[in-house]
Image: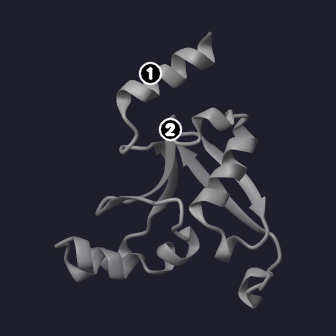
Amino acid sequence: MIICPSCVSPAQDLLVYLASNSAVHLTLEGLSCMSAQELGRNVREALNIPNSAVDLFAFWFCSPLLDLQLKPKHLPYKLCRQWQDLLYRFTEAPPEDISQDEPCLLYKRNVFYPRSKELQVCLFSVL
């Protein structure tokens, strides 16, 4: 196993916002090299979400200028550092707005997960 030197870092604090406008505070090591999938596992553990609901939720970077759903393989820390480049590429916002924009990390519904399956998982969890 190869360990990236930048991944061996002291624990860092992270706030992940939920659709309910509340936030989950996590303290994680190796955050700079952690994938969205690994981060999701930590959030599900903190919220006691069952593994059967793993595909129901996804991480999003949201700001007034752009909402972007992350794939499980994406590295949130890296994408956050590239946010201005993404805004130049995917928006027509003026440079002044782009330079001031900062995304929030949200954990909310995966838009690619079929609603019919979502309802099945929810009903199964309730029963």
Relative to 85, say whether 28 is above or below. above
**Frontmost residue, 104 versus 57:** 57
Q: Is 40 placed left or right of 62 in the picture?
A: right
Which is nearer the eye, 114 or 27? 114
Q: Going 37% across and 75% down the picture, which residue do you hit? A: 100
Q: Quadrant of the N terminus?
A: bottom right
Quarter holding the C terminus is: top right
Residue at the image position 80 percent from the left and 80 percent from the top: 9
- Compare marks 1 and 2 and give the one earlier in the sequence: 2
Q: Quadrant of residue 50?
A: top right
**Which element carries disc 1, helix, strand or loop?**
helix
Left or right: 76 with respect to 39?
left
Q: Which residue is mark 1?
A: 119
The numbered disc on residue 64 is none
Crowding at mark 2 (Cα within 10 Å: few <14, some 14-19, many 20+): some
Asked if labels 2 and 1 touch by Cβ distance under 8 angstroms, the answer is: no
Task: Name the residue at 16% across, 73% down.
Answer: 92
49 lies above or below 7? above
Tell me where residue 91 appears, x and y as whole percent: 21, 70
Q: Would you name the residue on which mark 2 appears?
A: 56
Q: Residue furthest front?
A: 1
Q: Is residue 108 above or below residue 75?
A: above
- Residue visible at 66% across and 69% down? 34
The disc labelled 1 sits on which kind of residue?
Leu
Q: Is residue 87 above or below residue 67?
A: below
Closest to the observer, 105 or 71: 71
Tag 2 secondary structure: loop
Q: Position of residue 5 (x, y in %)?
A: 76, 90
Residue 19 % position (x, y): 48, 38
Q: Pick out the residue farthest to the left.
A: 92
